Amino acid sequence: MTSGTGADHEVVVEAAETTAGINRTIHIGQPPKPVTFRIPAGITDGMRIRLRGVDTSDPSGPKDVMVRVLVNAPPEPPPSTTPPAGPGTAPRTGTAPGTGTAPGGSAGRYVIAPAGTRPPRRGPRLIVILLIGVLALVVWRANSGGTDYTRDTAPGEKASRTTGAVSGIGGVGGAGGGAAAETTATPTATVAPLPADGYQALLTAVDKRLTPGIRAIAFSRTQTAVAGAADNLRKALLSDVDRLAAARPPDPAGPAHHEYVTALRDLAVNLSQAGVAAREGLVCVGSSTIARISRADGAVRTRVAAAALARADPAHPYVAATFLPKPTGDKDRELANGTFVKRGPTNGAGQLKIENGTGRDVAVNLVRGPGQKATTIVYVRSGASTTVRGIRDDGYSAYVAYGRDWESTSKGFTRDCAYERVLSPMLFQTGGGQYTVYTLSLRKVVGGNALTSPVDPGSFPTG
């Protein structure tokens, strides 16, 4: 992409930061990974940087990423109104009144000659200086590797591209043989600051769009649902971050706005991490996922930045980040050992003794056949044992859910979940004054004969 105004990402820098250059970090791909790159000295508003091969999320191969740089420039000083000097006075330099355009149409600085005088021949000398500067930047590009810089062009304008060198150098006017350097692109106009009420409306709209995504996570009851809701919110958040990054806030809110945008990008990374945590069983339902997100680094930074926005302008205490849940700690709720989450028929003679030698509590589900719901679900604490009595004659399979923090509303654990099926079936029979007793030891036992197999959380039988 070498023309137009499109870009995959946008970053905002202050005008003062363009003097010496600055590093910036963006997050690329799925799951997002941080990529740090250098914004060179002398870059101007609207220029784009091509990061070569940094997006490795596409199976077809590495992709380039375009980053558009927005320079948050301070207001320009008013044009000079000093009257022309009399004859014999040395020429002065400045910005032309009115449009600020140099003779010949090139924007920039030029020599203003007093009436009736001829400016000195300074054009060739300045051109040599500029050419040396461009050459230095080309040499810098040869050693940087993997980054191109491109200026956005106006509609109908021929696209220009430089390799490492910053285009858009203003023309230098001269008379009497002094040649003028031409610009290679039309500078992009500085975005006007939003009024205070318009900026608050933007912040409020972002909160309203993101609030349903938080609720979707909170009400998720399976790991798959949690992961999907977290990913959907991440995409919505990044879309709103782009809107915020493209806007110019009122000047008093500028620094806090920049921190807010950066913090929201960090929060998007945390949402991606929450989705991974759900798929791996570190969080299992919406409540524990919301608690995890609420304490994440991105959430902490977002609250700090929102507080800074509220203080930025005493006349306009901006309100932001209302979508974000309050910091919440993990819970560790347990049922009493031997509690029946679901109690099946008790008029049988069979018995099942369960010994939990693992480091997590378990819920053991007895199921008669494939695809059926559990007839009995019993809770056994870590390091404890219990016996289920009165089991009817029949064949059963045992399914075991491991985890921490039992949530009664979802009838399952909220964190550190794992699901298994005992491969050896249990056949309970009664006759001749005898009945069947099984012992299920949930730990590694020398000589044990009960193998287990992992079960997808979505296929785990419930009551």
Image (cartoon, rainbow, N blue to C red):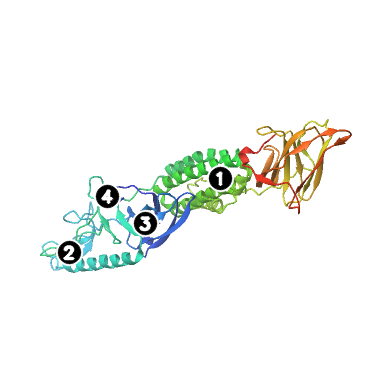
Q: Residues within 10 Å of mark 4 (few under 14, many from 20)?
A: many
Q: Nearer the viewer, residue 133 or 253?
A: 133
Distance of label 2 from label 1 (alpha carbons) = 62 Å
Q: Residues within 10 Å of mark 2 (few under 14, many from 20)?
A: some
Q: Nearer the viewer, residue 21 or 275?
A: 275
For residue 41, say whether it is visible.
yes
The disc placed on residue 153 is 4
Q: Residues within 10 Å of mark 3 (few under 14, many from 20)?
A: some
Distance of label 1 from label 3 (alpha carbons) = 35 Å
**Residue 269 pos. (x, y %):** 51, 51
For residue 388, say whether it is visible.
no
**Which mark is nearer the camera, 2 or 1?**
1
Classify mark 3: helix, strand or loop: strand
Give the left or right position of residue 442, taking residue 70 as reference.
right
**Which mark is nearer the camera, 1 or 3?**
3
Asked if the residue under mark 2 is in contact with the one under mark 4, i.e. CB atoms within 8 Å, the reply is no
Of the image marks 2 and 3, the number of the one nearer the N terminus? 3
**Which mark is nearer the camera, 1 or 4?**
4
Distance of label 1 from label 4 (alpha carbons) = 39 Å
Which quadrant is the C terminus positioned in? top right
The disc placed on residue 52 is 3
Q: Which residue is mark 2?
A: 85
**Residue 46 pos. (x, y %):** 32, 52
Of the image marks 1 and 3, the number of the one nearer the N terminus? 3
The disc placed on residue 324 is 1
**Which mark is nearer the camera, 3 or 4?**
3
Of the image marks 1 and 4, the number of the one nearer the N terminus? 4
**Residue 112 pos. (x, y %):** 18, 61
Of the image marks 2 and 1, the number of the one nearer the N terminus? 2
Give the left or right position of residue 176, taking residue 32 as reference.
left
The disc placed on residue 250 is none
Give the residue drawn at x 39%, y 56%: 13
